[in-house]
Each structure stands twice: as structure tokens, then as C-alpha cells.
Image: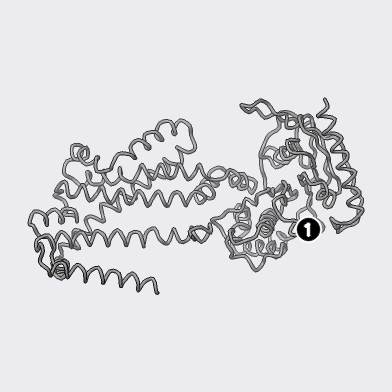
């Protein structure tokens, strides 16, 4: 494989989640994180999973990542069952999970080092390419603690993109950032999604964020975690989180979400 | 540079003060003049006694110390990883670490006789327990998210251990190695003062001879060498690591 092949975006994959259930047993009792959840995600789709905490949306993301196994049901990528983590599905976590003992370049290189067919110069070239894509080409030699929260998440994004995955899984990656930084990253993510053609599954509890980013917004309710409703977001891109149309969608979805939560509390 | 000069000034002042105390001849046996100590160091360096003893001591120390680390590091990781190891070796390490390492000397002498092996044994015992405990502690303090992130990037269990868990626990491990070094150094000095090992005269033995001869210049001269070795070890062996860790982690600034 040559460098220019490597820098071509990999074809996005389609995901199928079929009747997935997952129960966690702790000393405080059992938690039905997911109860017979099914979801189809097409190639290059951008799907946001929304719901209150404990609704199992992060668990579903971990199952797609291969970090956890479902108790029953199956998750398929292009028809093949997902059994373990793989570089075709990269994850971005809420905390950046960057390694403090490596500098910025070293962090982006970490995933590439485990990839065959690239020599050390090519790996560095690939890493620099993605750091440039997220606008941090001047910070390759910076230490992690010297970066702001937003910059850390940009490095985490570059690190996730570098092995050229077909699916990008994002677990509330912007939850800890300030509003201004977040807005910038909404723009960047939409741009990268359009350019690099990834299938993206994005977990959040922020409805406006979901509407701003997703083609589809999937609503979860907790105890047990179930999918309640799906919304197609038919807005032109790039979307501005402060636009009136977007706020309209968000209001409708929030109302629906409250309805499910209240109905559940009344039970 | 300014800090270097204040250090130098301080020590010059200390030596001058020492000289005046000695010149007052309050107790000429207890307080030799700094020049007499300097003469001892010079002469015994020229006739080879001091370099020879330093070499013998350092050889024992370094061999034992690195053996202790080679055993302690993997054991510490196993203790952190497996419940069975935690309940057995972990408890043992915790218990034996509280034992002052000089307490190993009588056992070593009975077991190995007056040999190099006895000296090595004492140094290894001084090192290994604190390295086990520091490694265990370090591994337990690694945020689990690092290993998860590494797994998604295609890292297997062994690669995660060597490339994530180990570097992530480096701050703990380095301070454990530093503590191990201090324990090993102290226990070796005690052992060398305690017993004469016929295969080599170390600094501790030279110190003890000084006492037997009532040669205070020799006693203080050897003590000075021991202090200098300790300082150098800290500056050469540990400071570069600590600086690197501080730079990466953004710690160490008050």
C-alpha cells in the first residue's frame, strides 16, 4: 500500500444492530442497559443517539466498538459480526483519553504504529496530514497538558481518523467543552464527515447538538434502554446550531423526550 | 546559573566554618581540619585504595539494584493484575517493605557466609519490595480509559502492557525505583560496616577501618565520598527521568 492510497478515505461501512440486549449486574442490582434494540445505519450515514443518562446509548456505542459484548442479539458491520475492537471502527471518548507520556504527534502515531505496510516516515506523514486536517499542524511537538480542552479533542479526532477507519464512534466528545469551542468543532466535524465520508455514530444528551450534526436523531429512553423514536433532520449543511429551523427541530425532539421520561416516571 | 552559584557559595561557607571550628582545637580528634580530610582523599586516591573501594561498592550496588528491578517490575505488574498474586506476593511485599533492610544482614551472613552473594542478597532485598509496591501502585492508578483507547486502535494485551500501562505508571515506578535505590544504598553500607568480605573492600569497610584506627580524617573523607555518590546517582540516574516526566505530565511546578 502506498502513501497516497493510505490517505484516500476508506469506504464507509454499514452497521446493523439486531435485537441487542445487555444487562449489567452490580452489587446494587441489575441494570437493563439495552432491551432488544435494533437499528440500521447506512454507509456514510451520520446518526446521533440521544437520551437521558442510563438509557444505554453509550453501551450501544461500546458494543459497536467491540469493547463490550451483547448478552443477546448481534451487531454486524457490512454483514459480518463484530466480535472485538478493530481499526475499522475508531472511538472518540468524552475525556480525550490522550496519552500524557507522548507528545501530540506520538499520540496520533500510536494507532498507526500497529498498522502494517507503512514505514516510519510514511506514518509520520499520515499523522501530520490528519493534524493539519484538524488545524493543529503547528502543535505536533506539544505536550498534552499544554493543550486546551478543545485542542485535546482535536488531537483525539486526528488520532481516531489516522488509521483510516470506516466508522467513527463518538461518545459525548464535546460535553466538557465551552460553548464557543463546541460550535467550532460542530463545523469541523461536519466538514470532515463530508470530506472523509465516514459512517458516524454520535452519542450525546444534548438535543441541539444532535440536530446540528446528525442526518438522523435516534431517541432512547432508560430503564430498560430502548429506542423510542427516530427523526430525520432535513436541513442543509453546514448547519448553524443557532439557526431558527434547527431550534424548531430541537424543541420537537425535546418535547418528545420529556414525554417518554414523564410517562415512565408515572408508571 | 544563579542557582548553581548559590549552591557553590553555600558549600564554600560550610567548609570555611568547619575550618574555623577545627582551628579552635576544641576537640582535635573529633574535628579534623578540612585540609586533613582533603589530604586523606588525595593520598588514598593516588595509592588506589579509595577508587578500588568505590568500585567494589558500586559494583555490588548496581548489580543488586538492577537485579531487584528486573525481579520487582514484572512481579509488581503481576500483583496489580492478578488477585491471587495480590493476596500472596502483594502482602509479602507490603510486610517485608516495613522491615529495615539492614535486618537482612544477619540472615544473609548465615545463608551465604562472608561472600559477595551475601552483599548482593542484602541489596536485592532492599530494592525489590519497594519496586514491587510502587509498580503495583502505579499500574492501579492508570485510568482504564487508556487501555480501552489502545484496544480500539488495535493494541493486543501485551502491547497494551508495554506501551500503555508501563509508561502510564512511570511516575509511580520512578519514585519507587528512587526509594529502592535509597534502601539498597543504606542496606549495603550497613552490611559493609558490619562484616568484612574477603573478596573486596568496599567503602563501608574503609569507613570501619577508619574508626578502628581512630583516623577521623579517613572516616569523614569516606563519608564525603558516600554523600557525593548518592548525590551523583540522584542527578545522573533519576533527575533526567523526573524532568522528562514533569515535562510530559505538566507536573513539578509549584
Label 1: which secondary element: helix
- Look at the image and name its color scheme: one colour
Q: Is residue A172 above or below residue A221?
A: below
Q: Is residue B188 above or below residue B46?
A: above
Is residue A45 visible in the rendered image? The answer is no
Q: Residue A89 location, x and y as percent? A: 71, 47
In the image, A3 versus B113, the foreground residue is: B113
> Residue A138 vs residue A184: left or right?
left
Q: Is residue B249 above or below residue A141?
A: above
Q: Residue B245 location, x and y as percent? A: 48, 57
Q: How many marks?
A: 1
> Residue A210 vs residue B78: left or right?
right
Residue at label 1?
Answer: A183
**Callout 1: chain:** A
Q: Residue A17 location, x and y as percent? A: 79, 36
The residue depicted at 82 percent of the width and 43 percent of the height is A41
Q: Is residue B131 above or below residue B248?
A: above
Image quadrant in which you'd find residue B5: bottom left
> Residue B227 vs residue A167: left or right?
left
The N terminus of chain B, quarter of image? bottom left
The residue depicted at 84 percent of the width and 32 percent of the height is A262
Amino acid at each position: 500500500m502506498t502513501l497516497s492510497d493510505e490517505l484516500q478515505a476508506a469506504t464507509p461501512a454499514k452497521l446493523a444492530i439486531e435485537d441487542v440486549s445487555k444487562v449489567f449486574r452490580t452489587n446494587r442490582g441489575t441494570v437493563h442497559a439495552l432491551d432488544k434494540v435494533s437499528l440500521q445505519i447506512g454507509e456514510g450515514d451520520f446518526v446521533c443517539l440521544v437520551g437521558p443518562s442510563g438509557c444505554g446509548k453509550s453501551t450501544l456505542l461500546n458494543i459497536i466498538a467491540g469493547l463490550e459484548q451483547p448478552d443477546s442479539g448481534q451487531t454486524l458491520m457490512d454483514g459480518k459480526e463484530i466480535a472485538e475492537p478493530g481499526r475499522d471502527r475508531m472511538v472518540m471518548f468524552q475525556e480525550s483519553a490522550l496519552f500524557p507520556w507522548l507528545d501530540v504527534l506520538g499520540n496520533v502515531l500510536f494507532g498507526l504504529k500497529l498498522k502494517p505496510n507503512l514505514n516510519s516516515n510514511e506514518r509520520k506523514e499520515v499523522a501530520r496530514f490528519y493534524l493539519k486536517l484538524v488545524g493543529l499542524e503547528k502543535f505536533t511537538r506539544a505536550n498534552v497538558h499544554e493543550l486546551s480542552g478543545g485542542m485535546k479533542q482535536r488531537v483525539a479526532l486526528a488520532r481516531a481518523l489516522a488509521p483510516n477507519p470506516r466508522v467513527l464512534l463518538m461518545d459525548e466528545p464535546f460535553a466538557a467543552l465551552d460553548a464557543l469551542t463546541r460550535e467550532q468543532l460542530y463545523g469541523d466535524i461536519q466538514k470532515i464527515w463530508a470530506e472523509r465520508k465516514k459512517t458516524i455514530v454520535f452519542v450525546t444528551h444534548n438535543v441541539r447538538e444532535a440536530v446540528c450534526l446528525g442526518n438522523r436523531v435516534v431517541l432512547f429512553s432508560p430503564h430498560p434502554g430502548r429506542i423510542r423514536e427516530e427523526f430525520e433532520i432535513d436541513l442543509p449543511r453546514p448547519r448553524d446550531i443557532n439557526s431558527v429551523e434547527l431550534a424548531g427541530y430541537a424543541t420537537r425532539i425535546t418535547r418528545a423526550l420529556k414525554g417518554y421520561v414523564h410517562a415512565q416516571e408515572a408508571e | 546559573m544563579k542557582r548553581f552559584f548559590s549552591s557553590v557559595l553555600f558549600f564554600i561557607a560550610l567548609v570555611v566554618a568547619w575550618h574555623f571550628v577545627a582551628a579552635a582545637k576544641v576537640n582535635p580528634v573529633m574535628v579534623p581540619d578540612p585540609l586533613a580530610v582533603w589530604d586523606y582523599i588525595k593520598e588514598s586516591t593516588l595509592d588506589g585504595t579509595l577508587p578500588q573501594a568505590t568500585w567494589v561498592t558500586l559494583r555490588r550496588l548496581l548489580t543488586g539494584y538492577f537485579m531487584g528491578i528486573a525481579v520487582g517490575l514484572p512481579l509488581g505488574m503481576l500483583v496489580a493484575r492478578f488477585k491471587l498474586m495480590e493476596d500472596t506476593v502483594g502482602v509479602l511485599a507490603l510486610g517485608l517493605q516495613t522491615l529495615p533492610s539492614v535486618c537482612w544482614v544477619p540472615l544473609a551472613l548465615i545463608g551465604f557466609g562472608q561472600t559477595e552473594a551475601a552483599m548482593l542478597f542484602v541489596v536485592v532485598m532492599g530494592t525489590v519490595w519497594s519496586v514491587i509496591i510502587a509498580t503495583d501502585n502505579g499500574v492501579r492508578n492508570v485510568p482504564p480509559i487508556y487501555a480501552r483507547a489502545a484496544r480500539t486502535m488495535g493494541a493486543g494485551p501485551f502491547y497494551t502492557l508495554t506501551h500503555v500501562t508501563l509508561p502510564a505508571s512511570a511516575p509511580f515506578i520512578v519514585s519507587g525505583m528512587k526509594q529502592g535505590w535509597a534502601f539498597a544504598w543504606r542496606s549495603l553500607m550497613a552490611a559493609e560496616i558490619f562484616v568484612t568480605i574477603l573478596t573486596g573492600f568496599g567503602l563501608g569497610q574503609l569507613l570501619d577501618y577508619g574508626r578502628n584506627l581512630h583516623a577521623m580524617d579517613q572516616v569523614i573523607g569516606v563519608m564525603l565520598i558516600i554523600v557525593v555518590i548518592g548525590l551523583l546517582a540522584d542527578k545522573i540516574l533519576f533527575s533526567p527521568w523526573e524532568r522528562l516526566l514533569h515535562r510530559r505530565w505538566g507536573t513539578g511546578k509549584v
